[in-house]
Each structure stands twice: as structure tokens, then as C-alpha cells.
Amino acid sequence: MASSLKDVARLAGVSIRTVSNVVNDAPYVAEPTREKVQRALEELGYRPNLAARTLRQGRSGLLGLVVPEIDSPYFGELAGLLADAAEARGATLVVDQTRGNAERERRLLTGPSGQLVDGLLLSPWALTPAEVLARPRGVPLVLLGEQYDEGIDHVGVDSVAAARDATAHLVEAGRQRIAAVGLQPHLANQTALQRVTGYRLALEQAGRPALPELEVAVERLHREDGARALERLLELDQPPDALFCFTDELALGAMRVAWQRGLRIPEDLAVVGFDDVEDGRWSRPSLSTVSPDKQRLAEVAVGRLLDLVGGSLEPASSTTTPYRMVVRESSSVHG
């Protein structure tokens, strides 16, 4: 039988009202009392009646997360960090995916299917900023990633600067023909556009032209797409001696093809990715990459969304979170 507030109050030696205040995260409970009640809640395995609380408070305690691909290493890791950040603030994360389908993104603009959420974290691929801005009002929204516009709260990395740094690292390593893998002209999201902009900027600053044959478009951002991209590049009369891949998955796929063709990494081909997923840390050679501060991104995004849920009247803002360039074996002869 499920425990009640009365059971928790009896065990903790406090009033039912005090237990209710703790469960609802009221700010005026003394810390020792709060800790005592929390121990009782955990011991009895108390679970609040969310339906009743929703009716009473007008909130469900649920935050929605809609991403393109749950099975992507990057989005999978980010979802876990967002869930942790939500839990630390007393909320629960509900996750859904769109596979980059525009109609599904439109349908999920108010939250995951069948769930009444207080707010939504969204990483759109297919919808334009204008379409997102024109969504029905009601559910507070924070965008994740590069796509944003005035009037929409947004949290993400400066992909132009990060891509510039990744490409500059390859320039400084003495690479002469640096390819960019990951353009996606068929999608509305800004990720690929910003990363190719940073790539071109680094070449321009080094006094080099951006060569169209070294900029490779892909259908998706997966390993097989990276593999196909390098296969095409190796057919050129002058193949590249370095790759900047817009995701680590693309880079890992390309590295497999390089190994199959007998190319040494990094001696014959240096490779840099983007995202710092776990596979890249354990690959052989280990993958150089742009490492976004995903922990910070998750905390800032959840914090801003909960502020909006709480009625914040601050104007919509764009928050840039940190990143760092991690040099590993795939672009450094010295490892």
C-alpha cells in the first residue's frame, strides 16, 4: 500500500502541513526539519499524487525534452545530464524524439505526446526559427543547440568559434588540405552552417582559400555518413591530409575507412571531431575533438526553463556555454 502524507508526518514527528511544504519545495521550512522529512519520505518510499498536485498547483512537475535522436551518443549523454539537473531542482524529465521530421517537430512543440509538461527543452532540426517563434503560446520553451532567433530563449555553444579553433588546430599542425565533413543544406537547423562558417574563417585567417571539393555534405551525422564522406574525398586527385568532422560520429566513421585504406592517423590523415562523446575517448587512436561543457549547458537550460515556468518576466535571451579543444592521438603525432 502506498504511503500517505500522514504516514510520513508520523514517522518524522512533524505535522502533515510540514510534510506537504517539503514535498512542494516550499522555501520556509527549516533545513533540519526538511532533512528529517526527506529521510522519512525516502524510508517510506513516498510518491506524490502528481494528478492531484497538477490540479491543485496548475503544474505537473514534468519538463519535456524533445531531441532529434535519443540513440545519438551526444543527445543520449545530454539527456542524462538534463534529467539529473531537473531532478536536482525537484522536476522530472520526459523525453521524446523527432528524427528530424518537420511535422513531428511541429506536433511536439507543446511537449512529448500524452504528457502535460510545465515547460519544454527543444533541439529542432527541421523547423526554421520563424516557425518555432510562431508556435502557440502557453508552454515555456528553451531551445538547445545552434538554432535560435530573437524572442526565443536559447542555450548552446558558440559553434562558429569552436569550429574555427578546431580548424586552426589543424592549420597549426601543418596540414595543407583540410576537409570539412558535415554540411547539411537539406535541414533548417544552424549547426552545420555555423560550423562551416567557423571552418572557413580559420582558413581565411591562415590566408588559405576554402575549396568547394573539400566541403562534404552528408545526409545524417552518423558513422556511416562519415565513412562515405571520406571515401568520396579519397577519390580526389589531391585527397585531404586532415578532416574536421562536425560530429564525433562522423569522425569515427571516417577513421574506420582510413584504417581500411591503410592510411595512418595522424601521420597521413589528421582527424578532429565535435561533441567529445565517450567512444572517441576510447577509440584507437583516440579522437581529438571540441568538448562542449555539457554539464553546464544542462544546468543553465533547466534553470532558465524553471525560471520561465515560475513566471519570470525577463526578456528572452541567448546563453553561450563553454567549450574546449581536446587534442588527442588522431591529430597529434606525439599523442
Image (cartoon, helix red, strand yellow):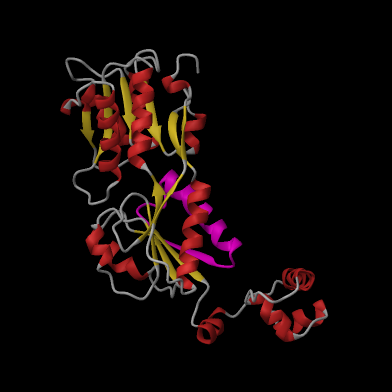
Horizontal side of residue 321 vs 97, given as left or right: right
What stretch of residues is rendered in magenta? 67-95
> Residue 325: percent from the left, percent from the top?
45, 31
Which of the 4 image quadrants contains residue 175?
top left
Residue visible at 25% across and 55% down?
A: 126
Determine if residue 228 is in view: no
Q: Kindly indicate the quadrant of the structure image that contains residue 139.
A: bottom left
Q: Nearer the viewer, residue 74 or 201?
A: 201
Front residue (pair 139, 3): 139
Please report the residue visible at 32 percent of the width from the left and 74 percent of the height from the top. 137
Q: Say which of 241 and 133 sits in front.
A: 133
Number of numbered markers: 0
Quick one: which residue is furthest to the front in this view? 314
Q: Can residue 65 be seen in this view?
A: yes
Asked whether 258 falls inside the magenta stretch, the response is no
Tell me which residue sits at (36%, 37%) in the image.
161
Rendering coords of residue 321 (x, y %): 45, 47
Q: Is residue 37 left or right of residue 217?
A: right
Q: Residue at x 30, y 52 (%)?
A: 147
| Residue 28 image point, x, y percent | 69, 77
Q: In this view, does 332 lie above or below 325?
A: above
**Considering the image in quadrants, where does the N terminus appear?**
bottom right
Residue 90 belongs to magenta span: yes
Describe residue 227's horizontal placement relative to residue 92 as left or right: left
